[in-house]
Image (cartoon, rainbow, N blue to C red):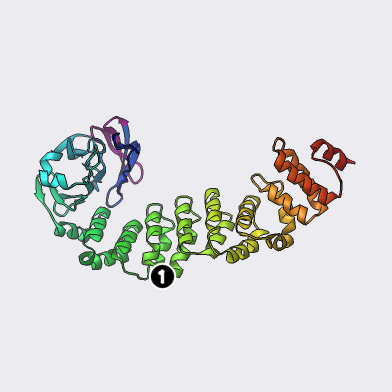
Amino acid sequence: MRAIVIVGLLASPLLADSLAAYGERSWASTTGAFVIETKEVVRGKIDFVIKSKRGRVRGKGRIDHMPLELALFDDGTGFVVWGRYTREGHGVAVARYDFDGTLRWKHDFKALFDKEQIDGFPSTLSFVLWARSIWNDPTRAELIGTTSTRLVLRFNTQTGKLRPGGMDAVLDSLKLKPPPLAGIEAAGEWYPERAREQLVAIARDEGNTVLVRVTAAQLAGRKGDYAGLWNDALDDAQALPRALQAATTVLARAAAVEFIERAALDKQVALVAIQHLAELGATRQLVTVLAHGDTPAQARIAAGVALRKLPKADVIKGVLKEFDDADGDTAVVMLDVLVAVGDKSLVRRLQPHQQKLIQLLDRKNANVVWLAGYFAAVPTTEAVPGLLRAARRLRGKRADQKAVFDALRKCTGLQVGNNLSEWERALKR
């Protein structure tokens, strides 16, 4: 699985650009039989541990390299690093290590590329951004390395001997069993027409992992009967982000919307899924996500924000339908949505939901000032206890507390001032 590198540029052009902390990263072998976990320990060095699928340690050590990409052999005997997180454009660019960290072979950056190639790489003030991906082709005992400028290099697995590659080296990787994810990505992005039929075949092959199949389907750019595959992706943490990204490309609209709605209940991708639903104008689905008891708290808030930008009539109708059955925290968000999109008729439309509004007077983060205004407009003695408790919580917020006192005057008929102690004595009597 490819790692993601974030390059952060400082605002001033006079300052050097910088990289985010390397942190911890992991890569799986193509078959998933082994995984290598890496962690930055000192500047420019990482500790690594190679583990089997069942967690047995195959090897560990420390290397003087922080790779951008890494290819782990399927038998766990070693790995190859590609690119360098620090000093990009300098030092060792590619190297093979055994499972215990013993160096087998290496190539320096300036030995791999000539000046014209180096000048063609995108760069910042301090870094040359050349490394793209690397994967293993065991049928040829070679490693295939690719660059950001579509150069393809081949390295002998045992000796590191270099020879140039090209489109055929990438397309041939699609024939491997199982096909490497990095090879699928390179073929689909660089040679979509030539790779399409093979990508479709990979997507349909149930012997491949869900992530591989979803990636191939996305890059094939051809709609098909992938609803079952996307359903499987909901239970696959690695495949789910990719499946969400590609849903509208690969699935019919109705199936895509249904999938995205279900994905919004997953904490890992909830916020992205809600953004997609908003872009699709899927009001009903966003209301369902908002009302669902399993929706993560942050996602519920995000769904509420998204609904404020959709057709008001549909939003109000959908939210009111779910309002009474919602738990307290969800109802608080729903009320915020209604207040944001509603007009003068909102008070009238909320009258059948008065008992829910009374309950919200005691909820943390509820819009108590708006609720007080509502009960001032639609007085009821049933709201008095909740209004009094709200006034106590609002000590020190005189303007907000006054709105509650105005509501208490309407609901009780008592002409008491804006003093909490006076209200407590009056109501006690």
The percent position of residue 176, horizontal first and vertical second, equals 21, 58
Residue drawn at x 32%, y 46% is 4
> Regarding mark 1 in the picture, which secondary structure is present there?
loop
Q: Residue furthest top?
A: 42
Q: Is residue 156 visible?
A: no
- Magenta range is 41-66
- Tell me: 414 left or right of 217: right
Residue drawn at x 15%, y 44% is 118
Q: Residue tagged by mark 1? A: 252
- Tell me: 170 left or right of 324: left
Residue 181's quadrant in the figure? bottom left
In the image, 129 versus 423, the foreground residue is: 423
* Main SS class of the magenta portion in the image: strand
The percent position of residue 268, horizontal first and vertical second, equals 45, 50
- Tell me: 429 left or right of 338: right
The percent position of residue 401, horizontal first and vertical second, equals 73, 41
Examine the structure image and report whether residue 59 is included in the region drawn in magenta.
yes
In the figure, 317 relative to 121: above or below? Answer: below
Amino acid of disc 1: Ala
Q: Is residue 282 visible?
A: yes
> Is the C terminus in the top left, top right, bottom left or bottom right quadrant?
top right
Residue 202's quadrant in the figure? bottom left
Examine the structure image and report whether residue 104 is included in the region drawn in magenta.
no
